[in-house]
Amino acid sequence: MTGPVLASLVVGDVVAERSVQLTRESLVRYAGASGDFNPIHYRDDVAAAVGLPGVLAHGMLTMGLAVETIVPWLGDAGRILDYGVRFTRPVVVDAEDGADLQITAKVGALDEGIARIDLTVTFGETTVLGKAQVRVRLDG
Amino acid sequence: MSVNPELVGRSFPPTAPYLVGREKVREFARAVFATDPQHLDPDAARGLGYADVVAPPTFAMVIQDLTLQQLLAEEDSGIALERTVHAEQRFRYTRPIVAGDELVAQLQITNVRPFGKGAMVTSEAEIQDASGEHVVTATSVLLIGGDVA
């Protein structure tokens, strides 16, 4: 099995990045796939009634698409030992323009066969996840 | 009603077994913009040594959600969905979830601490396969707002 090699990595290396455009359709699709039908993720009137700036992406959608950025690089999702995030800022998904997210995955730390990959997800000028860290098992 | 501090240490009964379907994994993969063939193509997954398509890492939330429903249904919890914000989430894996797995989750409340007028509630769902082996532990921190005046 081939995959990334620990010895070839340096802290600070960008190992993967991508951009994802979320639309209202993305939110409905995630609602159906995950079973999270909270209406703040697809109804403007409900979002407004509870004081939100607009319809929001599910935090778990952002968390899920962020980690998928590194799966092709890892080659095997089974290399992931743990993954955690804090949900720090909402992603407002405009009905017409959607929301563009930029994901960057960098080596945060290296230790004994394990790399910590730090994910940064930005929406416009703001970072929407805090401490988004994936610990992965790598060869040599 | 505010969050009941006596929730700490409370364990819930295991959830009914959840059978992970191949098409459900594919549907979830598309929803999180997962394009890697291991999530979609059984042959690609078998090439990595798995029995069938590999679920994206956050698919464990689908199983964990069954346990959070148990928590919300607890009459003395003081937790109302409309005042709940998902503050943190973590998964600790022994192995990835694969189509064909039959999974059971067991919830435990590990921490309740005051936060402003509300509380931060930490819950851990331990997810096991049909042979009782650990697959993944899903930990959520929920911020429960205080009563609205």
Image (spheres, helix red, strand yellow):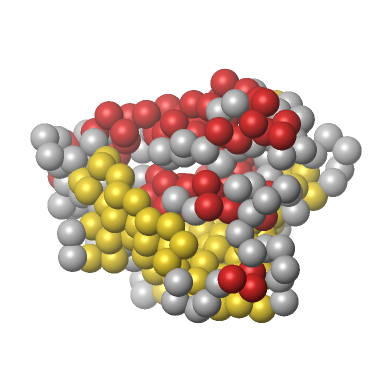
Task: Quadrant for residue A8, please give it.
Answer: bottom right
Nearer to the camera, B99 or A47:
B99
> Is A40 on the left-hand or right-hand side of B56?
left
Residue A25 on image: x %, y % = 27, 29
Q: Seen from this angle, which residue lies furthest left?
A: A96
x and y percentages locating residue A9 in the rendered image: 56, 72
Number of marks in the rendered image:
0
Q: Residue at x 49, y 26 (%)?
A: B27
In this view, the residue farthest toward the top is: B23
Q: Is residue A86 visible?
A: no
Q: In this view, does A72 lie above or below B27?
A: below
Residue B23, quarter of the rendered image = top right
Q: Where is residue A52 in the image (x, y as percent from the top left)?
A: 19, 51
Residue pictured at 73% horizontal, 31% vertical: B46
Q: Which residue lies at the image location 67% right of the left edge and 63% below the top edge?
A: A138
Above or below, B47 against A17 in this view is above
Name the spot of residue B110 as percent of width and height, x first: 65, 65
Q: Determine whether, in the image, residue B31 is placed left or right of residue B67.
A: left
Q: In this view, does A105 lie above or below B100?
A: below
In-front residue for pair A82/A15: A15
